[in-house]
Image (cartoon, grey):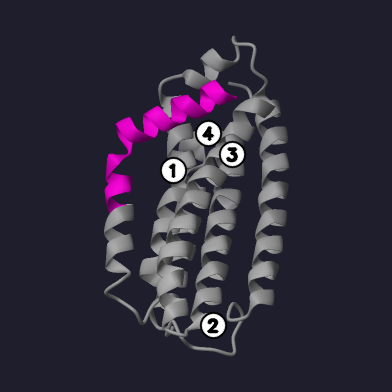
């Protein structure tokens, strides 16, 4: 498992530098655009797609077939991608939650701070949870429909987020209890997706 994580970290650096550049760009931009959650949520969207990208490279290079000859179970292969999702999304949540959240709290915008955490948690959990089962069941090519559905959902969410003032109150996400609810909901969806992906990948013929 540790070796699989190292492999994907190396591959992320080798093949996905542009994602990292975009992540840093939107993170910096978020400090200049203060009336929308979009520029804060987009880095989470980017990193939530990285495990899917790594799985696409694995199948393109036939790494998944090679893995079947190693002392690794398919459950471990799937679990590594979900752990990678938690690692990447957790890093972005920590970065944006601490740095940007500190600014909001100093400005007295506690509702906006909780709103930020709720959105980041939901994007971080739900994005990979919706896409990865399709990828593990059918592969990157046949599972590309999941990409299109997810991108459509992101675009729709983006329109709503961009027209939504960050400091607006009296809505879901603006209270501490909403952050907890988002965490519980996201964790349940993520766990169900994890189990489903393992079962689908174990039945798949490579």
Pointer 2 or 4: first along the chain: 2
Specify the quadrant of the image occupied by residue 76: top right
Residue 21 is inside the magenta segment = yes
Mark 4 = which residue? 139
Residue receiving disc 1 = 50
Characterize the magenta stretch by its predominant secondary structure.
helix
Q: Is residue 16 magenta?
A: yes
Position of the C terminus, as image quadrant, is top right
Q: Is residue 116 visible?
A: yes
The CA distance from mark 3 to mark 2 is 30 Å
Mark 4 to mark 3 CA distance (whole Å):
19 Å
Residue plotted at (44% across, 34% down): 54
The residue located at (72%, 48%) in the rendering is 192
Q: Nearer the viewer, mark 2 or mark 4?
A: 2
Q: Secondary structure at mark 2?
A: helix
> Considering the numbered disc 4 on the image, is that residue within a helix, a strand or a loop?
helix
Which residues, given as a range, are shown in magenta?
1-22
Residue 34 placement, left or right of 76: left
Which residue shows up at 28% across the image and 63% down it? 28
Which disc, if any, is residue 83? Answer: 3
Q: CA distance from mark 4 to mark 1?
A: 15 Å
Q: Earlier in the sequence, mark 1 or mark 3?
A: 1
């Amino acid at each position: 498992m540790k070796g699989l994580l190292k492999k994907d970290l190396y591959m992320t650096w080798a093949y996905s530098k542009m994602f990292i550049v975009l992540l840093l760009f939107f993170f910096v931009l978020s400090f200049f655009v203060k009336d929308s959650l979009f520029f804060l949520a987009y880095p989470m969207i980017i990193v939530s797609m990285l495990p899917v990208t790594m799985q696409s490279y694995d199948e393109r290079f036939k790494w998944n077939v090679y893995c079947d000859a190693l002392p690794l179970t398919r459950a471990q292969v799937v679990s590594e991608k979900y752990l990678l999702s938690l690692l990447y999304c957790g890093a972005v949540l920590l970065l944006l939650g601490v740095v940007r959240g500190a600014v909001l709290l100093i400005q007295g915008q506690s509702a906006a701070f909780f709103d930020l955490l709720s959105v980041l948690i939901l994007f971080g959990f739900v994005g990979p949870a919706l896409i990865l089962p399709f990828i593990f069941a059918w592969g990157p090519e046949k599972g590309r429909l999941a990409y299109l559905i997810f991108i459509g959902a992101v675009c729709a969410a983006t329109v709503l987020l961009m027209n939504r003032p960050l400091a607006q109150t009296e809505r879901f996400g603006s209270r501490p209890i909403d952050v907890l609810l988002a965490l519980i909901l996201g964790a349940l969806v993520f766990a169900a997706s994890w189990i489903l992906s393992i079962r689908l990948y174990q039945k798949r013929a490579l």
